[in-house]
Amino acid sequence: DQQVKQNSPSLSVQEGRISILNCDYTNSMFDYFLWYKKYPAEGPTFLISISSIKDKNEDGRFTVFLNKSAKHLSLHIVPSQPGDSAVYFCAASPLNNNDMRFGAGTRLTVKP
Amino acid sequence: KAGVTQTPRYLIKTRGQQVTLSCSPISGHRSVSWYQQTPGQGLQFLFEYFSETQRNKGNFPGRFSGRQFSNSRSEMNVSTLELGDSALYLCASSSTGGGGGYGYTFGSGTRLTVV
């Protein structure tokens, strides 16, 4: 049951431009949404999260937007840097337990 | 402090065999979750343990099982291995018993290859 979906398996952008990664979810019981970044041969690392009561959360170059009515969230990276090249996973979690579900991931390539 | 440790890093098994993977969480973390990562499927949730109890379970067959010890270390077992079980198995620990925006800390994973 794919409760969290990332429909774009890959994205390529030029250094300095904006990267926009998208994610859709089906379960309206999710309370928190998170983005993780993964490099090869390493585990995913937490990047940024947003509560379902908010529509935007910003942390430096990273901003996550949440559209609850559309069950859609996106991660914006501005400006993109070559070191941002990685696989990005969208995840969602209910408030009261650690049942976190992930999307299939989007491979971001930032070209110098 | 030490991160999440998964052993072994790599494993090759034959179809029909069984395998046990180990995960040592960050000291003080009581929640351990297991995920299977395969190309195109992302991270599929296997199960989550908290204080030695399985609290959440994903949609995997009964061949996949796990347990957690009193020191919070966790093991997962896969019996009667199939070729499709080849994947990267990741565990993550969390300090909180609840969910929410408290990101997990993941280990580097165990790469299982079934031949």
Image: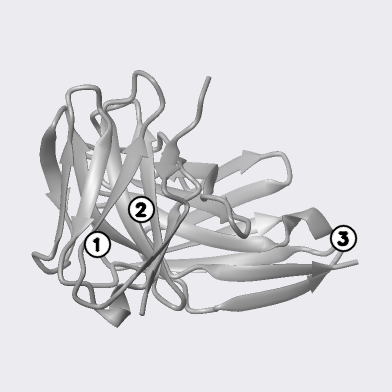
Callout 3 amino acid: Gly
Which quadrant is the N terminus of chain A positioned in? bottom left
In the rendered image, the vertical position of residue A63 relative to residue B30, given as above or below: below
Callout 2 amino acid: Ala
Residue A70 visible within the image: no
Q: Which residue is at 50% across, 31% downward?
A: B3
Q: Chain of mark 2?
A: A
Q: Counting residues from the N terminus, which is met first, the one under dot 3 or under dot 2? A: 3
Q: Chain of mark 1?
A: A
Q: Which residue is at 71% across, 64% downward?
A: A19
Residue A86 visible within the image: yes
Q: Which residue is mark 3?
A: A16
Q: Secondary structure at mark 3?
A: loop
Mark 1 to mark 3 CA distance (whole Å): 35 Å
Q: Which one is in front, B23 or A85? A: B23
Judge the density around disc 3: few (<14), some (14-19), many (≥20) Cα neighbours within 10 Å.
some
Q: Chain of mark 3?
A: A
Q: Which one is in front, A6 or A40? A: A40
Q: Counting residues from the N terminus, which is met first, the one under dot 1 or under dot 3? A: 3
